[in-house]
Each structure stands twice: as C-alpha cells, then as structure tokens.
C-alpha cells in the first residue's frame, strides 16, 4: 500500500497531528494580533504608528513592548523552535513503518504535550511545569529522529 | 499514478510554489548580509567587531541595532512564522488529491500574497496593508490544513 | 521503486541528513537549558523568578540577558532560518531523482557545513569564518531549490 495515502492509518495519524500543530502555530499569529488590538500597542515597525483607518489615533507608545503581547511572541518562538522539526521528523518516522499503536502514542502524545505547554505558558505557570511539558515533546522528537536514523542505516 | 511525482501536475504546482518560498526565505538572509555591508553595522555578536579582512576598522557602534537591517530581520521572522508551515501544509494538501485548479489558486495565491507582503513590508507601507496581505496567506494556510484534517478523518 | 522508501539509497541519504539536522536543532534547546542552569539566569519570562523546587532562591537579575545563553539563542535562531528550509528542499530534491553521488555531496556537505558553522559560532571565531561556512550551506540550499524548480518545469 502507498505509505503516504490517507488510507494508511499510520499516515492519517501523522496528517491529523501535523495539521493540528500547523493550526496551533498559525493561531499564535492571530492571538498576537488579538492582543495587539486589545492593548492598542505592542507594535514593532516604525510605520505602525502612522495614522490609518485601523489606527486612527497613533501614539509613539504603541511601539513599546507590551508584556501581554510579548508573552504570545515567546510562545510563538517556542513553537518555531519545535514544530517545524516535529513536522518533518514525524513524516520520516511514518516512512519507517512503525506500528499504528506506537505512531498514535508518539504523534498524539506530542500534540497533547504541546497543547498543555501552551496552556501552562499562556497562564504563566511556573518554569518547572512549562519545562516538564516541553521535555515530553522534545523527548518524543528525539526518539522519532533516532528511530529514523537507525532505520536509514538498516537497523 | 505516483502522487509525489513531478509528472503529477498537482505535485509539480506544489514543488514550484515550495521552491519559490524556500528561495524567498533564503533571500532574506542574503538581504540582511547586503544591508549589514551597506551600513557597515547592525551586527549581533561581540566577536563581529574583531579586526578581520572583511572588517578592517571595527567599531563598537557596529553592534548597535540598525533600522535598515532590523527591518529585514523582522520580515525574515515573519517568514519563519509562516513559510515552514506552508511547506508542510501544502504537501499534505497535495496528498488529499485536490483538483489542479484549486491547487493552483491556493498554492500560487499563497506565493503571490507573500511576495506582495514582502513588497509592502520592505517599502514600509501602512500596517493595514501589510496585515491585509498577511491575512490572505494565513487564510489559505488555515484552509489547506482544515481540508487535510477533514480528509484524514475520512470526509 | 518507491522513491520515499529507505531501500532507496538516495532517500536514505536524505533521511540521515534530515535526522541529524533535526537532532542538531533540538540540541540547541537543550544547550540553552544547560547554560541557563550553569548561569542560574538568562531567563525570559516574569514567572521564571517565582520560587520553585528548581529555582529555590529566585532573583530579578535572573531575567537579565546572559551572553553565554544569548550566544546559543543566536545559533538557534540561525538554525531556524536555515534548517526547516533545508529539510523541505532536500526532500523535494530527492524527488527529482538525482544521482546518489550528487545527493551525498549536497546533503552530507550541508550537514558538515552546519556542524562546522556551529563549532565556529560556539567558540566565537571571526565573523568572516562563520559567514564562509554559512555561505556553503546556503549555496547548497539554493542549488537544490533551483534544481527542483527546473525539474518541475520539465527541464
């Protein structure tokens, strides 16, 4: 059977996990926009304090960092450090023909760890909790990449 | 037919869009280099103000942020927040067997929206215009990921 | 033969190069953690100076930038600007059916250039050396993407 067909339940598992993670990352952009609108600030470019229909009363203070916006930017950067690598590592892992059960545990486990990491970061839980949740995802990513490496070397 | 063959016009469409976006992102690195050379500054690492053949008269001011360089870095960061997710979302979308017409509209539409976004950001157009162009690309990305999700669940 | 099978030596070459680059990027996160622990600082979020089992004696100075931590963050950002695009460009290049010899030179050459770039950045070599090593990888990336573009257009 074609490994990259959605008829293949292992690949379908990957496609679901990958799409959810892509939508998660894109949501961070929209959340940044939402918080910039709420705060009416947290902008970054000099031209953002030009008078426009969406910014009728510009103010240089709009370019100052806003902690509620910066928090989302930090979460977003954490996504950029993790999700693109998960997306490719997961695809390569699927091509090593893992069992459906293992693929589900790892791929959905990763998704859940990242959603919980988001919840912990968003609500400013302790660094310890955030680090623990990040570690779960990172270990899954390392495991999948090592598995692919071994398979590529014929083991 | 093999879905991931360049003989498949839907996949060829993706390969063209993806390659253009990769070259676009890589160009941002080169543009940053070009502007650092023009400005003879905008560097980031302490060792960058060591005397070398390429930097014969170093000066601590070379480490200060330079707005012309920072603008390209902001455009680049925006690419990092968007393009890697487009690259995977587009590939997964191709694997859902969309019509060639739909694939062309979405994939080339995304490319065009990002090139216009670059033009608007590069020339410091208003935030409103930049946001509108970014939104077009983001909505295409969300649509492709939702389509993949539905297809993976059998719809 | 299935192009995306690990039985295909060109794809296996890609899988090895990609897995090594993913593990390299993930290592930057762990190295950041290691240096934050060593420095007992370089944190970024206000909640990181709350008293916890892992941070028994918090201090506002822990939120100040720490150069040893910031260096790893800069290396990491450079990875984010390069590796996700390599991962997709390499996969598309494999689908153009290159010779095994060319694939090995380009894919392993990229990996080696990035490992040397890391070594140069980590040990604070001159900007000239770092730029040279970065350029090697960037040119390989551009070559692979241009090759894919041409192949997609039927050349």
Image (tube, coloured by chain):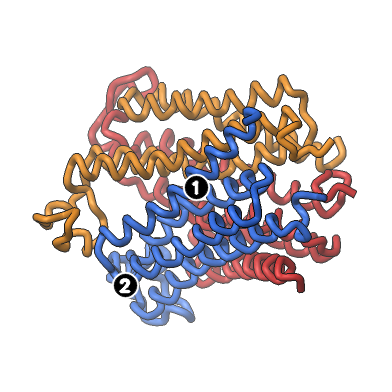
Chain colours: A orange, B blue, C red
Residue at x 31%, y 43% (from the top left corner): A32
Nearer the camera: disc 2 or disc 1:
1
The residue at which mark 2 appears reads as: B123
The span from disc 2 to disc 1 (Cα, nearest Å) is 25 Å
- N-terminal of the pair, mark 2 or mark 1, is 2
Given residues C78 and B1, the one toward you in this image is B1
Residue C60: x, y in percent? 23, 34
Give left or right: position of B95 versus B135. right
In the rendered image, which residue does mark 1 sit on?
A: B141
Q: Residue at x 45, y 61 (%)?
A: B114
Q: What element does badge 1 sit on?
A: helix
Side of A20 relative to B97 (left or right): left
**Residue B64 sits above or below residue B53 on the image:** above
Which residue appears at 58% of the width and 53% of the height? B102
> Which chain letter matches label 2?
B
Q: Nearer the viewer, residue A60 or C135?
A: A60
Q: Is B113 positioned to the left or the right of A56 in the image?
A: right
User: Which part of the image, by quadrant, shows the C terminus of chain A?
Assistant: top right
Q: Is residue C95 above or below residue C32?
A: below
Q: Chain of mark 1?
A: B
Q: Position of residue B17 (x, y in %)?
A: 59, 61
Dividing the picture into quarters, in which one does residue A140 lie?
Answer: top right
The residue sitting at 16% across, 52% down in the picture is A62
Q: In x, y percent, where is residue A33?
A: 29, 45
User: Residue B23: image x %, image y %?
Assistant: 56, 66
């Amino acid at each position: 059977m074609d490994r990259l067909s959605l008829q293949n339940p292992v690949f379908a598992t990957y496609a679901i996990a990958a799409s959810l993670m892509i939508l998660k990352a894109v949501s961070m952009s929209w959340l940044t926009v939402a918080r910039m609108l709420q705060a009416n600030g947290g902008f970054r470019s000099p031209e953002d304090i030009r008078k426009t229909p969406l910014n009728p009363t510009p103010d240089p203070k709009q370019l100052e960092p806003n902690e509620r916006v910066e928090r989302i930017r930090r979460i977003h950067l954490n996504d950029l450090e993790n999700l693109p690598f998960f997306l490719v590592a997961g695809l390569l892992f699927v091509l090593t023909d893992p069992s459906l059960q293992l693929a589900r545990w790892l791929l959905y486990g990763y998704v859940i760890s990242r959603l919980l990491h988001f919840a912990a970061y968003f609500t400013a839980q302790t660094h310890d909790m955030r680090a623990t949740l990040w570690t779960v995802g990172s270990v899954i990513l390392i495991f999948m990449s090592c598995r692919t490496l071994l398979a590529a070397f014929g083991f």
